[in-house]
Each structure stands twice: as structure tokens, then as C-alpha cells.
Amino acid sequence: MKLNLWLNNEMPDIAKSLEGINNIYYFNQKTIGLSGKEKIYKIIHDVRSALFPGVYEKCPIDETRINIFIGNNIREAAIELSGLIEKTLIDICDTEDKETRNCTKCRSRANDITIHLMKKLPEIREKLHMDIQAAYTGDPAALTTEEILLSYPSIDAISIYRIANILYEQKVPIIPRVMSEYAHQRTGIDIHPGAKIGKYFFIDHGTGVVIGETCTIGNNVKIYQGVTLGAKSFQLDEHGNPVKGVKRHPDIEDNVVIYAGATILGGDTVIGHDSIIGGNVWLTHSVPPYSKVYNAQPSPIIKQGKPE
């Protein structure tokens, strides 16, 4: 059959049959959609440019006008973010006249959340400086803090996490997850915005790290590549669906080092402070402070490097 004939005769019926399917997905895409995701990426860029002026710009900035530069970035990010938050809040709003001009509840809430985040920027910057220092002192290959800020994927992921976490704590829908998945795509590090992470946090190498939603991490914690802080199992409701909002991921106390490939699971699992978790350890129960956990494996067999 010729394409034009098919398009004229049969395509309208297919379009009509799809019209009513999964309207919720269409509605959400209308709220955020691809253009919304791109706006979120731009917001991340503007906020991080305000946090570290000149680092994320393609051209050098005039140091005599740095306050104007920071102010412009904050202003642009705030206006765009407030509009996106308002749209996501309208999507879940239970006010009867949310589609009319009579309700300003979502707009006011979006403005309050945006202002709250912008006021938190000095605190976020202070924490990121501590994270950079943790990377510098924790990695003998790091020669300067500038090198860490510009090239380390962990700082990329953590900076986005610390922004997204503020929005998550304010119960903003969708946007924090888009931010965290953007970081995941860029770095291979998957940090849920709901996780709680303390100061002086460093992820060395970074690739393949997963940190779950209800995980808590204390101060001065160092994690290597391939570490999973995940859920052991899911509670199911009477319909067999996972129960939302329950504690599923472990707690890591202060001054803990977790080496490459370790997997720590469970909402009731606590790694005591000043502990060391060895590489490729599988752990589903708590360990006390000052513990050292290693795999019980036989020594590797090494043959002399001579031809047989």
C-alpha cells in the first residue's frame, strides 16, 4: 500500500485509538516535557555558575563585575525554577479552581520554595568547599583544588545532589529527580535526591556508585567506585505493589571508608563510625564502630612469569 493512501485512510483511526491512552503521561509531559528538562539543565548551570563564578563559563568573566554576574545567574535561575515548580505543583494540586486565574496557591508556594533554595546557596557552597577539600586530602593524585572542581565526576554529582536535595526536602515533584538523573548520565554516579549526606564527602573514581533514597551518610565518609548503598527488599501492600516512603537503605556513620565494589543493603543496616568496609563485601547487617570488614578469600595463586 502506498504511504500517502495509508496515511489518509487508516492513520486517523490509529490516532483516535491512542488519544485516550495513558492521559496522565501526556499531562505530565505537557507540564515538564523535553523543553522542561532542558530548562532544568540550564537552571543547574546557572546555579553552579553562581556558586563558582567563572568555572562553568566558556569565556572569562570580568572580576570587577563579579557581583553582577552572580546576581544575573541567580535571577535567571530563580525565575525559570519558580515557573517550573509552579507547573509541577498545579499538576498535583487539589484545589478545585487550579485551572483558573483565581488560585494563586501554587504560585505562592513555588516562589517560597525558590527563595528558600536561593537563601541556601551560601550553605551549599560551604559544603561543596568541604567536599572539594575531602577529595584533595583523600586522593594523592589530586594536585590542586581547581583540578578537582573542573575534572572530578564526584564533585559534579555531589554539587547537583546538594541542589536537588533542597528541592526534594521541600516536596517538589519531578524536578529533583530530573536533576539527579542528569548527574547520573554525566558521571555514572546515581545519588537519589532524598538521601541525606553530611560534610566532607568524597567519591573516588565514582563510576557505578548507587546511593538510595533513604540512605543517610555522616561526615567525612569516603566511597570508592562500584559501591551500592541499596535496599535489601521491598515491603508490598495488599495489591503486591511496593510500599512508598519506608526506610529501605543503610545508614553510614562518620569517618567510614567503603572500598570498591562493596554492597551494603537494608533499612536497618548501620555501619558504625570509623569503620572500614573492604572491596566486594556483601553486607546486609549492622557492624559496630571501628569495625574492619573484609571478604574471607584464599590468597591468590601467583605463578612465576617464565615460559613453560
Image (cartoon, rainbow, N blue to C red):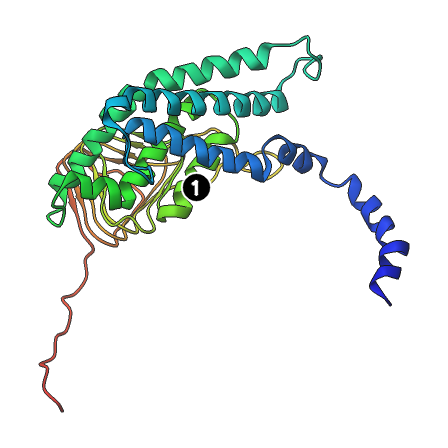
Q: Secondary structure at mark 1?
A: helix
Q: Is residue 28 left or right of residue 275?
A: right
Residue found at the far bottom of this picture: 308
Residue found at the far right of this picture: 9
Quadrant in the rendering for residue 1? bottom right
Q: Residue at x 86, y 49 (%)?
A: 12
Residue at the spot of label 1: 182
Quadrant in the rendering for residue 98? top right
Residues packed near mark 1 inside 10 Å, few (<14), some (14 to 19) or many (20 plus): many
Q: Residue at x 52, y 27 (%)?
A: 173
- Between 243 and 153, the one nearer to me in the picture: 153
The answer to whether residue 185 shows anywhere in this view is: yes
The answer to whether residue 231 shows anywhere in this view is: no
Q: Residue at x 43, y 25 (%)?
A: 77
- Between 83 and 234, the one nearer to me in the picture: 83
Quarter occupied by the C terminus: bottom left
Query: Identity of the amino acid at label 1?
Result: Tyr
x, y percent for residue 276: 16, 43
Is 65 above or below relative to 224? above
x, y percent for residue 305: 10, 82
Residue found at the far top of this picture: 102
Q: Is residue 285 left or right of residue 42?
A: left
